[in-house]
Image (tube, grey):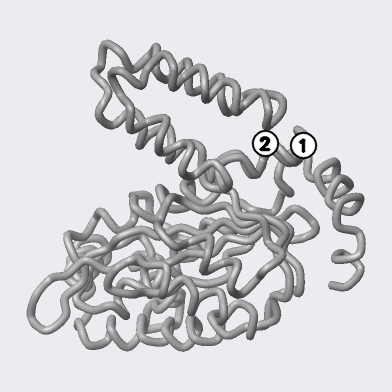
């Protein structure tokens, strides 16, 4: 390393005249956000900076994040979110001396400007419609008065929970989830053909054409896979919602890809740990990861102006009311 004879070199870590690390807390929080454990952080600082950091100090620094999470979780929300995606992911945390699965509930809203906004995250032992009902009530108490379309997975009782809180909200079940479930017990050899025939259903231009394609599917495949058409027919009221909307909106509500992409990014962080020591530790890591991901959400989703124009025509009175 060359000598700095004129003292022009400015250290980036410990500045001249200082005896401690500047931005030390921020570095700990940044590393913690990547899913590293307290022990990993201790090893990192010792290896990279030659500094010994106590587990207690790291915990104190990251504990401050929980206060921020509490404020964020209680913040007022907008009155109208034209589209909202509801989904959950699973993390493992220690409780009562044993490691258990925890469902982390996520609500991702699209506001009137077409911007993504995570409305909150909640943790419960298992995913269920009853807990989703409490989540929706909380959103309403925080100011969300109307939702045009709720995009969800195939959880039993989910649509009824939404309609209990937001009776005018249309529910669209994720087509991708339905197709994935349909192909679960189909042989690898038959999957391309079955998938192609299912695609004719959800790419049909009208609900009548979709129903005809479903009937044709049943006639062709019921002898080998009768459960597939029965599942589509049973869920048709919520699978077919998107037919009532123009292409600009169909593309947005067609799947739950928006929130599944978020979940995939969060899993990259959580998979670095086999489990979290507490539920609070999991919440801290997820919240910090969400802050980083939300920096990429500055652009409205594609074709939003056209979609919002259609919403105004369809729900003009509800837009004004909000």
- Is residue 219 rendered to the left or right of residue 314? left
Q: CA distance from mark 2 to mark 1?
A: 6 Å
Q: Residue at x 57, y 67 (%)?
A: 162
52 or 227: which is nearer to us? 227
Residue in the image at 20% along x and 82% along y? 55
* Residue 50 visible, this angle: no
Residue that mark 2 sits on: 251
Where is 79 relative to 5, above or below? below
**Image quarter for residue 180?**
top left
Closer to us: 105 or 186? 186
**For residue 248, which numbered disc appears in the image?**
1
SS label for mark 2: helix
Q: Residue at x 21, y 60 (%)?
A: 273
Residue 253 spot, x, y in % from top left: 63, 44
Q: Which mark is residue 198?
A: none
Whole-percent x and y of residue 194?
39, 17
Can I make out residue 271 in this image? Answer: yes
Is there a contact, CB below 8 Å, between mark 2 and mark 1?
yes
In x, y percent, where is residue 252?
66, 42
| Residue drawn at x 71%, y 24% as measured from the top left | 205
């Amino acid at each position: 390393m060359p000598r700095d004879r004129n003292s022009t070199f400015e250290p980036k870590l410990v500045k001249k005249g200082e005896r401690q690390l500047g931005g030390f807390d921020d570095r700990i929080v940044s590393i913690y956000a990547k899913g590293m454990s307290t022990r990993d952080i201790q090893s990192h600082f010792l290896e990279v900076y030659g500094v010994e950091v106590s587990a207690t100090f790291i915990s104190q620094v990251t504990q401050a994040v929980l206060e921020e999470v509490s404020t964020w979780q209680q913040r007022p929300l907008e009155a109208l979110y034209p589209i909202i995606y509801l989904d959950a992911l699973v993390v493992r945390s220690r409780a009562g001396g044993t490691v258990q699965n925890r469902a982390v509930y996520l609500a991702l809203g699209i506001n009137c400007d077409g911007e993504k906004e995570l409305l909150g995250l909640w943790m419960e032992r298992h995913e269920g419609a009853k807990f989703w009902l409490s989540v929706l009530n909380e959103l309403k108490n925080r100011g969300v008065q109307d939702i045009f379309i709720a995009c969800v997975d195939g959880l039993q009782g989910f649509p009824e929970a939404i309609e209990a809180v937001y009776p005018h909200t249309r529910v669209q079940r994720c087509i991708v989830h339905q197709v994935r479930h349909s192909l679960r017990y189909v042989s690898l050899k038959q999957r391309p053909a079955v998938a192609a025939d299912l695609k004719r259903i959800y790419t049909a231009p009208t609900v009548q054409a979709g129903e005809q394609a479903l009937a044709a599917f049943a006639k062709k495949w019921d002898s080998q896979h009768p459960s597939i058409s029965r599942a589509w027919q049973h869920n048709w009221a919520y699978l077919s919602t998107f037919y009532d909307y123009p292409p600009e909106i169909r593309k947005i509500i067609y799947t739950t890809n928006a929130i599944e992409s978020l979940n995939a990014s969060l899993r990259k962080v959580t998979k670095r740990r086999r489990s979290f020591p507490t539920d609070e530790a999991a919440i801290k890591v997820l919240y910090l990861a969400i802050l980083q991901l939300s920096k990429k959400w500055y652009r409205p989703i594609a074709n939003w102006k056209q979609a919002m124009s259609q919403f105004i025509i369809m729900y003009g009175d509800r837009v004004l009311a909000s």
